Image (cartoon, rainbow, N blue to C red):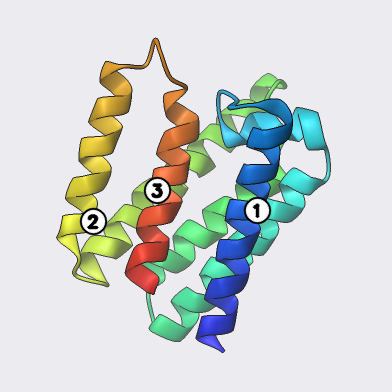
Amino acid sequence: MREIILITIAITFYSFVGFVWAKFGILKSISESYYKVGWLFPAFCLIVGIGTFAIAWIDNSFLLASSGGALVVVGVLPEIKIPYIKYRHIIAAVLCIILSQLAIYFNYHDWQVNVLFVVFTAIFMIFKKRIFEIWWEEVVAFTCIFVVLI
């Protein structure tokens, strides 16, 4: 069952990101795609978030479950152009990434993946005028989770 859930969230994530990239190019963040694809963005967040929560339940990882829950909140609050929703959305998105990295370190004991995430994030921050770092940080964060859960 765990493998089916993992494959489902991986296909959902990479298909959605690939579709958005192919159709609209690289946006500032994956969340910006809400204004391009509408309901598909919340559906994407709910599938990946609930799937991550389910895997965390199986693996007994409170941190990863909280990360999945934060992604569900991101999907429930997609209107980032409304100020009071934007801040809650950003807090949930940042928590999703931080909690997933903490889960990788504390629950899955794979600190090398954390180091790679930090290195890539630093590179994105250095070159942020040339690339959309938030988009790529989100992609790298999910890829880190996926690699660890395999």
- Indicate the amino acid at tag 2: Val
Residue 72 visible in rendering: no
Q: Which one is in front in this view, the residue at disc 3 or the one at disc 1?
A: 1
- Indicate the amino acid at tag 1: Ser
In the image, residue 27 lies at what x, y percent? 60, 25
Mark with earlier residue (3, 2): 2
Mark with earlier residue (3, 1): 1
Q: Which one is in front in this view, the residue at disc 2 or the one at disc 1?
A: 1
Q: CA distance from mark 3 to mark 1?
A: 16 Å
Report whether 46 appears left or right of 131. Answer: right
CB of mark 3 within 8 Å of CB of mark 1? Answer: no
User: Camera-side residue: 29 or 49?
Assistant: 29
The residue at which mark 2 appears reads as 113
The residue at which mark 3 appears reads as 141
The residue at which mark 1 appears reads as 15
Q: Please tell me whether mark 3 sits on a helix, a strand or a loop.
A: helix
In the displayed orientation, state which residue is furthest to the top: 129
User: Camera-side residue: 36 or 104?
Assistant: 36
Report whether 121 appears left or right of 25. Answer: left
Report whether 37 appears left or right of 102. Answer: right
In the image, residue 65 lies at what x, y percent? 47, 68
The quarter of the image holding the N terminus is bottom right
Report whether 65 appears left or right of 100. Answer: right
Q: Residue, x 40% and y 48% (percent of image)?
A: 141
